[in-house]
Amino acid sequence: MDTGFEATTSPIFTLLVGPDKKEAYIHSDMLANASDVLSVLVRGDMKEAREKRAEWSHVDEETFSRFFQFVYGKDYIVPSPIVLSTPEEHDDSHPKNTKPSRNFLKTTAVSPLICGGLYLCPFFPLVPSLGTPQVPHPHIFKLPSFLRSLQSTEPFHPRHVAST
């Protein structure tokens, strides 16, 4: 598992990102090193591996951008959450935020919910395609440790990779 210079000299893998299927390019070894499942996608005996091309139409461009940042830099930029309203605007029966409304914060593809150091990160669209059964959709997690957990020793099952 090379994550250094050699990985950046590996063949280019094309991902068709978002509903418009825009082409995004990433070094095969860098993508494969992101998780065991992605390693099978890149190096396995599947059409995607042979063609060095896969469709990720369920992943928006902003999410892919953060994934790309993480794959190459082991970090990514978290956008600020967007506050749509205050709790008081939704729940007048409880003074001073004793029971905040569920609508207090809303996340979008570019704005994760941040709560106590945890992120409801836009990476969650990647989770179902990876088929990690222990992760509900959407899931609150600390992203770096979550992505490291994708490198588990669980056996690969074909249902883990979306075949769209």
Image (cartoon, rainbow, N blue to C red):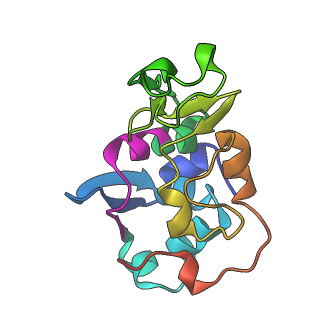
Q: Horizontal and vertical percent for residue 68?
A: 47, 43
Q: Is residue 71 above or below residue 15?
A: above
Please name the residue shown 32% across and 45% down the image.
61
Please name the residue shown 51% across and 75% down the image.
161
Query: Which residue reaches farthest top?
Result: 96
Q: Is residue 137 above or below residue 77?
A: below
Please name the residue shown 41% across and 24% down the image.
82
Q: Horizontal and vertical percent for residue 129?
A: 50, 68
Q: Is residue 74 visible?
A: no
Q: Nearer the viewer, residue 62 or 110?
A: 110
Q: Is residue 29 above or below residue 6?
A: below
Residue 60 lies in the magenta-colored region? yes
Quadrant (top left, top right, bottom left, bottom right) of the N terminus: bottom right
Residue 110: quarter of image: top left
7 left or right of 118 in image: left
Residue 116: quarter of image: top right
Q: Is residue 61 visible?
A: yes
Where are the magenta residues, as a range? 54-66
Residue 137 lies in the magenta-colored region? no
Query: Which residue reaches farthest front?
Result: 93
Q: Horizontal and vertical percent for residue 115?
A: 64, 29
Q: Nearer the viewer, residue 10 or 115?
A: 115
4 left or right of 105 in image: right
How many numbered marks have been drawn onto this rendered protein structure?
Answer: 0
Please name the residue shown 56% across and 85% down the image.
158
Q: Nearer the viewer, residue 126 or 39?
A: 126
Quadrant (top left, top right, bottom left, bottom right) of the C terminus: bottom left
Q: Horizontal and vertical percent for residue 25?
A: 35, 52
Query: Which residue reaches farthest left?
Result: 20
